[in-house]
Amino acid sequence: MGDWKSVTVPLVSSDLKHILSYTSERKRSSTSMNSQVLHLPLPLSKNMHSFYSAFCTEDNIEQSISYIDRNCVRLIQLLIYFFSPPPPCFYQELTTLGFPSIYAESKGKELNLVSIINCMNDLLILQHKNLRAQEEAEMQHMKLGSDMDHLQNCYAKLKDQLELSKREIVGLQERDRQLQSKNRNLHQLLKNEKDEVQKLQNIISSRATQYNHDMKRKEREYNKLKERLHQLVMNKKDKKLAMEVLNYVGRADGKRGAWRTDKTEARNEEEMYKVLLSDYEQRQKQLLLENAELKKVLQQMKKDIISLLPPQKQKPKERSEDGLVLSDQEEDIGELNKENMWELSCETVREQLTNSIRKQWRMLKNHVEKLDNQVSRGHSGALNEKDVISREDHELETEKLELEIQQCKEMIKTQQQLLQQQLTCDDDTTLLLQDCYLLEERERLQEEWRLFREQKKNFEKERKSFTEAAIRLGLERKAFEEDRGAWLKQQFLTMTADCKQSENVTTPSAFLRGSDPDIRLVRSASRQRKPPSVLSASVAAESCQTSQYIAQNSVASEKPAADNMPNLWVESDDKEETEECTKSWEDSGVGTLLCRNLHMEQLP
Amino acid sequence: MQILQVYTCLDQIQYIEWSSDSLFILCAMYKRGIVQVWSLEQPDWHCKIDEGSAGLVASCWSPDGRHILNTTEFHLRITVWSLCTKSVSYIKYPKACQQGVAFTKDGRYMAVAERRDCKDFISIFVCSNWQLLRHFDTETQDLFGIEWAPNGCVLAAWDTCLEYKVLLYSLDGRLLSSYRAYEWPLGVKSIAWSPSSQFLAIGSFDEKVRILNHVTWKKITEFDHPATVASKKTIVYKEVEKSPTVDTERFSFSPSRTLDSSLFSTKSKYDISQVPVSLQYIKPVADRANPKVGVGMLAFSADNCFLATKNDNIPNAVWIWDIRKLKLSVVLEQLCTIHYFQWDPCQPRLAVCTGTSRVYLWSPAGCVVVQVPGEGDFQIMSLSWHCSGDSMVLVSKDNFCVCYLEGEEVK
């Protein structure tokens, strides 16, 4: 608000000065303002009233008016400064404040009543405003004061609390320290006790060893005495007979006593082992019986548990896999329920049984837990079965998933291995592989070559034989032809001699008689192909001869041609010929017969 | 009870024993070192065995009833005298311990504890011809006792009370198992086999009984004997003195015997105490050897179902354990210290004597106090059942009486 300078206003009367100084004092001490502000307006007004009445008398009206006019400015300024924010400029004319001059404008020293009253009114208004402002300021001042008091109280309380808590902390720390020290003491005591116990145990053990040692020493002495005594006793023994019996009693079991020999020793051993064995066997039997009974009980329990779990079978399709699992288990159970399984006591069967029972028991437990949960939820009122996945289902699912994962992993592994084998095959291996195939083929080809060569040899042989046969045939034919020619000549000659004799000359060839009509036909057919040299009226004989001849001819005619050709030809031709011959003869149904005849002809 | 025979021996008899076939009686006179044998069939037959200067400490029959085993003084040797032949066998270095000689139940084998050169050995002999079958050393500090299992295939050997160690040997001398419950405190006090050889009960100085099973030879359970019985399922029978009723005055005209008995002997009966029950506990004297602490008496019932024990700290009580459930079944609290108890050889029936003139019988059906009728004080020190289970002999210092038990017929 700027600094306040004490305004020294030349005052006419001391009362005004007092008022001014009063107001300036008021300003300085803000606290006193509160108490005094309230009182101020009343006495002031009174004072002012009395003061103003004292100030202006009929005598010094003009002076007072001029004074007011002169000092009005300053007074108003003061008042303004007191009760409202001060205008920037300290010295301002009344006129500039907006108050019209008291003096009449145009009438010189004549007073303008209106303006005076206006001024008065303005002053009053200002005064009111200022008073109000003052009140407000006082109120605020009061408020602030009370706030301040309150805060100071709080502060004091908090300080007290802080003090208290600090003291408490110190107290607790002290206690903590005490307890810790106690704890340490106790630990120490405990350690001491333990050490003592250990020491005592050591003492005991050392004393025990000492006693043992002493005992042994005494015992040895004692033994020596005993030995000595024994010797003395034994020496004295031969004096009298120790046992007097009227007559000897028979043995309890009626048998005679036996000498002690190795045999008896062996028998004793045997007996002993027999006894032991029988005992073990008995025990084993008992254990087997017990086992069988327990297994039966377990099987029954399993059945009971399965019977207690019907709801699982009726699960929705989502759980169909679990159902499958169940059915698998049930199959296993069915298998295990076979009686002969009970007899087996091998590890796997036992494990199977116990595992299946454990599984069933777990399922039952889960089922019961589920029921419990349902019941509790039913009580609480919220039944969200769909959201809740029972633990057992969850477990089954996880197991299944794990299995799947494992299987997949294994598959992946195997695939990887195979792939690796395929891809990262070395060149050598491929070559080797290729070579393998080539070798195979080569070997096969070789085999075939071998066969081929063998066959070739065989064919060679056959060809040779055929050629020989053909040569022979040719030769024979030649001979035959010559003979025939000669014979025909003779015949002709005889025929011309005996032309009347038209007998059917039967040739020595016996086979003609049994000939088929086909042969006759053939003969007849072949007759026409007779070489010009051959001319005979005889039907049968000639025809057969001619047939023979045809055969021979065919062979012979081709023979010379054949002879000129190289071997291959011969072979094939021979083959063909023989084949043809055989074919033709076979077709006619006389193949074999005529061939035979052929041979027969060739023979001579 | 009619006197059949009277035999006169040369000296005061310390020990008397029937032969196994009940044809001969052995009378041992330790002071003179003589054993006399009498025959029932032939009263004229006599036999006298004189150990001479060797002295006699113990004497017993062999299982076949034809051999006598004499232990000479200082346990120098065991002499086996044969009544059939004139042969004598010696077993050297026998051990001077509580149970040094043990016969199998079928009488085929005999185990003898020996000690040579400060080491313990066990020798197994065949009883038929006294041939040595096996000889092996034991891992004991000081072998205290040996006992065959009833099936004759396992031999239990235990160490002195300074070491808790129980060794189990097979008939052929193999060590089957070794059991040790703890190391330093006093160890085994008593041992008992169950009749089926399935269990071995070991009573020790720490007031506990540990039971081993014959399959694994490992402990299957341990029974504790605390002074307070807290289990709800245990029945505690307390012997309570019956105050003489006013009715006895009415019986003033009854025979004097009953009057005397009622005057001199107090009657008692059993009451069932409410659990928890605190039993009378005696704190043992600390600096004496062989303190009266621990389980000193152990006995299995004949049907293998019950085990009766006595804790020497609590000398008035008999603890009966159910072996099938492995739990404490019954506690019999008597007025006086228990001297002896024995199971009926046929049924699960226990007879207890406490040095008073009453014998106490317990069976799963209940328990009963049997007063010995008679004049004066008949202090039963020991008792013995007949093998048929119908009667038992009650023995006091100077007298004995036979108690017949009538069996109820089930109609």
Image (spheres, coloured by chain):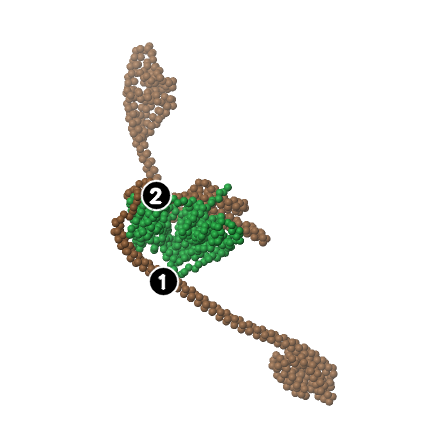
Chain colours: A brown, B green
For numbered disc 2, what is the local secondary structure?
loop
Q: Residue at position x 49%, y 45% from top?
A: A301
Foreground residue among B39 and A237: B39
Whether B286 is drawn above or below A448: the answer is below
The amino acid marked with disc number 1 is Ile
Task: Check disc 2 and report the residue beneath it.
Answer: B43
Label 1 vs label 2: CA separation? Answer: 63 Å
Residue A345 appears left or right of A378: left
Whether A559 is drawn above or below B201: the answer is above
Foreground residue among A529 and A245: A245
* Label 2 environment density (alpha carbons within 10 Å; few <14, some 14–19, many ≥20): few
Q: Residue at position x 61%, y 80% from top?
A: A2
Quadrant of the rendered image containing residue A469: top left
For numbered disc 1, what is the local secondary structure?
helix
Foreground residue among A574 and B265: B265
Chain ID of residue with mark 1: A
The amino acid marked with disc number 2 is Pro
Task: Check disc 1 and report the residue beneath it.
Answer: A203
Find residue B121 and report its horizontal and vertical position in percent.
32, 52
Find residue B264 and report its horizontal and vertical position in percent.
47, 54
Q: Nearer the viewer, mark 1 or mark 2?
A: 2
Quadrant of the rendered image containing residue A11: bottom right
Whether B313 is drawn above or below A173: the answer is above
**The N terminus of chain B - image quarter:** top left
Find residue B107 and report its horizontal and vertical position in percent.
36, 45
Residues at marks 1 and 2, common chain? no
